[in-house]
Image: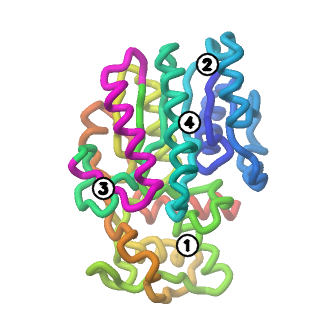
C-alpha cells in the first residue's frame, strides 16, 4: 500500500491521482480534514482508505501488520503557510511528525519521500543543495531546513530510500483550498475572470514592476519527479524540484491573459509587512537531480499555465 500524507492537500492529492492513474488501487490518504473544504481534492479518487493524521500514527504503533503492508510513504503533510509565526506549532507539525515517520520507515526499510521546500534558501541568490546557501526567512522555511539537516545527520547512508524534494513555486489543479497561499497563477486567473485585470506588486529589491523572478513549476512535473524516485529506490538524498528556469510574475500574468484572450496588468504597492521576508528571486539548480539520472522535463510557465487553465475550464 502507498501512503500519501497531506493526501487531501494540493501536492498530495495530485500524487494520489497520479498513483491511481498508474494502476495502484491501494493508496491510503492521511490528512487532517478539520478544514473540510479539502475533501473535493480526493472525492473523485477511488482511494483504498482514509486516516486522520493522528490516527495514522496510532495505527502504526498498535498494528505491526499494517506497517508491514506499506510499499512507500510519500509524506506531503505540513503547515505550508509562510505567514504562520507560531513556531511551536510549526515545529511540532512539520518537524517532529516528520521525524516520527522517518524512523518508522528506516526501521522497516520502507521508501520515504518527503516534501521539503525552496523556502530553506530564503534570501540566498544560490540555489544548490548546500548548507552555505540555506538561510530561511520565516519559521516555515526553518522547519523544513531543520528536518533536512536531521535527515543528513541520521540518514546520510540509509539502508532504504529517503528522499527530500525541495519544491519551488508549484502551481496547478487542486490548490483552490489554499486561499492566500495558492499560486499566483490561481489568483491571477480569478482576478482576470472577476475584474479583467491581474494585480501584481510594484518593483522591490531592485526589480521592476512585476519583474520579481521565481521558479514556477507545474504540478504534473512535480508528480513525475516523485514517480521517478519511486522507480529508482536506490537513490536517496535531498533534491531541488523546480523547473530550473526563473520567470517573472509578469510572465505568469501574461500567460493567464493570453489564455483568456483579454485582460490587463495593474501594479499595486509592495506590502510593507513583506519587506525583508520576501524572495524576489528563486531558480532551482538542477545539477544534483540530473546527476542521479532524473530526466523529467519541466514545462515553461507559458505551457504550464495553459495546461492548468485548460483543466480548470474543463
Q: Earlier in the sequence, mark 2 or mark 4?
A: 2
The x, y position of residue 240, in whole percent, is 35, 45
From the viewer's side, name the closer residue of 13 and 205. 205
* Mark 1 and mark 2: Cα distance apart in space: 42 Å
Q: Secondary structure at mark 3?
A: loop
* Mark 4 and mark 3: Cα distance apart in space: 22 Å
Q: Earlier in the sequence, mark 1 or mark 2?
A: 2
Q: Earlier in the sequence, mark 3 or mark 1?
A: 3
Foreground: disc 1 or disc 4: 4
* Mark 3 and mark 1: Cα distance apart in space: 37 Å
- Name the mark on residue 66: none
Foreground: disc 1 or disc 2: 2
Q: Is residue 211 above or below residue 215?
A: below
From the viewer's side, name the closer residue of 73 and 221. 73
Quarter of image, res 311 = bottom right
- Which residue is identified by label 2? 70
Q: Secondary structure at mark 4?
A: helix
- Which residue is identified by label 1? 259
Image check: 215 left or right of 33? left
Does the stretch in magenta take in 153? yes
Q: Is residue 118 above or below residue 77?
A: below
Q: Earlier in the sequence, mark 3 or mark 2?
A: 2
In magenta, the rendered stretch is: 132-161
- Which residue is identified by label 4? 97
Q: Is residue 159 above or below residue 137?
A: above
**What is the chief secondary structure element of the magenta stretch?**
helix
The answer to the question of whether label 4 and label 3 lie on touching residues, with beta carbons closer than 8 A, is no
Q: Residue at x 62, y 55 (%)?
A: 173
Amino acid at each position: 500500500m502507498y501512503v500519501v500524507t497531506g493526501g487531501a492537500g494540493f501536492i498530495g492529492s495530485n500524487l494520489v491521482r497520479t498513483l491511481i492513474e498508474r494502476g495502484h488501487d491501494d493508496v491510503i490518504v492521511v490528512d487532517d480534514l478539520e478544514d473540510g473544504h479539502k475533501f473535493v481534492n480526493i472525492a473523485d479518487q477511488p482511494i483504498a482508505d482514509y486516516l486522520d493524521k493522528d490516527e495514522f500514527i496510532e495505527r502504526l504503533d498498535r498494528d505491526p501488520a499494517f506497517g508491514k503492508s506499506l510499499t512507500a510513504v510519500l509524506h506531503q503533510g505540513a503547515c505550508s503557510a509562510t505567514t504562520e509565526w507560531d513556531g511551536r506549532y510549526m515545529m511540532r507539525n512539520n518537524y517532529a511528525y516528520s521525524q516520527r515517520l522517518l524512523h518508522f520507515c528506516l526501521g522497516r526499510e520502507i521508501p520515504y519521500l518527503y516534501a521539503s521546500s525552496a523556502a530553506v534558501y530564503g534570501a540566498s541568490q544560490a540555489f544548490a543543495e548546500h548548507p552555505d546557501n540555506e538561510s530561511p526567512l520565516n519559521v516555515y522555511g526553518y522547519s523544513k531546513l531543520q528536518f533536512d539537516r536531521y535527515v543528513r545527520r541520521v540518514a546520510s547512508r540509509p539502508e532504504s530510500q529517503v528522499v527530500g524534494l525541495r519544491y519551488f513555486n508549484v502551481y496547478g489543479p487542486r490548490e483552490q483550498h489554499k486561499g492566500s497561499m495558492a499560486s499566483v497563477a490561481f489568483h491571477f486567473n480569478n482576478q482576470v475572470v472577476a475584474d479583467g485585470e491581474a494585480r501584481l506588486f510594484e518593483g522591490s529589491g531592485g526589480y521592476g514592476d512585476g519583474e520579481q523572478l521565481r521558479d514556477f513549476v507545474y504540478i504534473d512535473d512535480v508528480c513525475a519527479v516523485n514517480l521517478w524516485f519511486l522507480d529508482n529506490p536506490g537513490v536517496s538524498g535531498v533534491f531541488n524540484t523546480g523547473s530550473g528556469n526563473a520567470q517573472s510574475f509578469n510572465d505568469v500574468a501574461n500567460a493567464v491573459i493570453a489564455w483568456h484572450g483579454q485582460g490587463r496588468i495593474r501594479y499595486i504597492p509592495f506590502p510593507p509587512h513583506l519587506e525583508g521576508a520576501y524572495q524576489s528571486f528563486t531558480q532551482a539548480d538542477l545539477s544534483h537531480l540530473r546527476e542521479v539520472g532524473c530526466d523529467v522535463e519541466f514545462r515553461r510557465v507559458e505551457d504550464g499555465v495553459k495546461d492548468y487553465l485548460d483543466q480548470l475550464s474543463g
